[in-house]
Amino acid sequence: MKIAFLGHGKVGGALASGLANAGHDVVLAARDPESAGIKEGLARNERLRAKSIPEAVAEAEAVFLATPYSANISALDSAGDLAGKILVDCTNPVGPGMQLSVGGSDSGGETVQRLRPEARVVKSFTIYGYENFEDAAYPGYGDLRPAMLMCGNDPEAVAEVGELARDLGWEPVATGPIKMARYLEPMTMLWIEMARVQGRGPGFTWAMLKR
């Protein structure tokens, strides 16, 4: 799949590198393809390329939004036409005091879908820290893979993102329409509380056991 990344920090960089290693055509979308940040991202994996934002997005089948949540509007404004494209929302609406700035009757995922109604938004790759995107392997559990929960209004888009998750070592779990982001985003906060605040460390994920 042809994939463009808006945002290539810890989360975006880990996902971009992993998907490139899995055989996908991955491009870092950049305001300045010659910037130090882009050069650092490219140095991470020789399979990655960089292009201007309009060019990278125009060529992509899927666009990953992996910016800080506060930068979402700016990033989406720069992306150009997203009609019919899969837009993977990897962001979390974390506000002051490590609290969700959107929640209850709304979510960051729904906000992204409203901002770009022409795109096929899928909320995914948000419920863990970047360390698990760098390495999803948890040996010793047989065929059981860690779960990657996701949601979106377009079932075909969700299934395609599920295949990308599978390529990265996850068991994709579709949870329903985009409004389910109201529940996935608090899962991120739960993980952060346990891993970062309580000091358990990042080496754990959720899994789905089925009879």
Image (tube, rainbow, N blue to C red):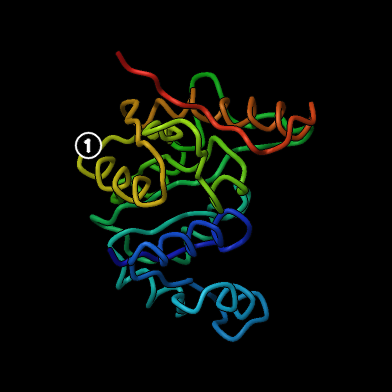
- Frontmost residue, 208 versus 185: 208
Within-10-Å neighbours for mark 1: few <14, some 14–19, many 20+: some
Left or right: residue 113 versus residue 84 is: right
Element marked by disc 1 = helix
Instruction: Pick the residue in front: 153 or 23.
Output: 23
Q: In this view, does 173 lie to the left or right of 136?
A: left
**In the visual, does 44 lie left or right of 99?**
left
Farthest residue in the left direction? 156
Across and down, in percent, residue 132 comes to 57, 45
Looking at the rendering, in which quadrant would you find the C terminus? top left
Residue 171 position (above or below residue 210)? below
Q: Residue at x 37, y 68 (%)?
A: 57
Residue underneath mark 1: 155
Q: State the image coordinates of residue 200 (x, y, percent, origin top left).
A: 74, 30
Q: Specify whether 201 is left or right of 93.
A: right
Q: Tell me if residue 137 comes above or below residue 199 in the rendering.
A: below
- Residue at screen point 62% across, 51% down: 68
Percent across and percent down for residue 121 are 35, 44
x and y, in percent, of residue 33 in the image: 54, 82
Question: Looking at numbered disc 1 in the image, what kind of residue is underneath it?
Answer: Pro
Which quarter of the image is occupied by the N terminus?
A: bottom left
